[in-house]
Image (cartoon, rainbow, N blue to C red):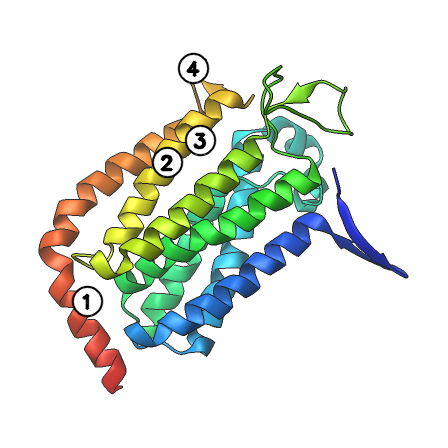
Amino acid sequence: MYKVLLEIGNITIYSYGAMIALGVLSIIYLAGKIAKDIGLTSDNIIDLVVAAVVGGVIGSRIYYVLAYNFDYYLQNPWQIFNIREGGLVFFGGLIGGALAVIGLIYYKKWPIWEIADLAGLFVPLGYFFGRIGCFLNGCCYGVATNCFLGVAFPSLDGQKYHPTMLYSAILGLGLFFFALWYRKKRRFAGESFLYYLIFYSIGRFFIEFLRENPKVFNILTVAQVTGIVTIIVSLILYPYLRRKNAYKEKDDVKEMKSA
């Protein structure tokens, strides 16, 4: 579509990278305004975002290489580092980013589930910008269609395809506004994050039917299987956190504010 957003002399600004940068800056700005509610500073938010981005990129690339095109990358290992043409999987990014952030949280002794709720609010916003970047880059499109929603991508054969990246962007934006609305209604720390995992997995499950991705046992895609596992784990965690975590996180926040 519009892979190159801007060229200034020898400097090329790619649409996908620009959208990712815009998403990161938006998250840092907005999360910084909420951080004080849980005893964090704007600098703490920057540390968390950097950890999430680095871990997310690594995780999303590893997931893609292992799950979607392992034989190709086994023969062309240096192509693993070429992400200009896409090849990043969100579920992998979620796992990689979460591991990096969890490591930082435990090192700093920050309240993990309060921060998880921040992630449940702002990860969907970053996802929105990322999927807009996918659309501009012309990647992550769906199956061929004659539906009025179909888009003809210049780099392809003229056939219209489902713009699944836009469907995903709408999903992300909807989850962001839901989490923003629900933030004051939370009954325990971690609730918004679990809702995000569940609702995202459900939305992604249905969007996957409009994409041509490798299937596990010719039934469901890797993302759908990952989503089902995510939903099950989230539902198991929900009653546990509801019983155990609300008062514990309040104590954690008080300790941070007094530190």
Please name the residue that numbered disc 4 is placed on. 217
Label 2 sits on what residue type? Ser
Tell me the quarter of the picture where residue 70 sits. top right
Disc 4 and disc 2: Cα gap in Å? 20 Å
Lateral position of residue 188 relative to residue 28, left or right = left
Q: Is residue 58 above or below residue 229?
A: below
Please name the residue that numbered disc 1 is placed on. 249
- Asked if residue 99 shows in the view, the reply is no
> What secondary structure is found at the residue carrying circle 1?
helix
Lateral position of residue 57 relative to residue 94, left or right = right
Whole-percent x and y of residue 68? Answer: 56, 29
Label 3 sits on what residue type? Ala
> What secondary structure is found at the residue carrying circle 3?
helix
Please name the residue that numbered disc 2 is placed on. 201
Please name the residue that numbered disc 3 is placed on. 223
Q: Earlier in the sequence, mark 1 or mark 4?
A: 4
> What secondary structure is found at the residue carrying circle 2?
helix
Whole-percent x and y of residue 53? Answer: 53, 58
Label 4 neighbour load within 10 Å: few <14, some 14-19, many 20+: few
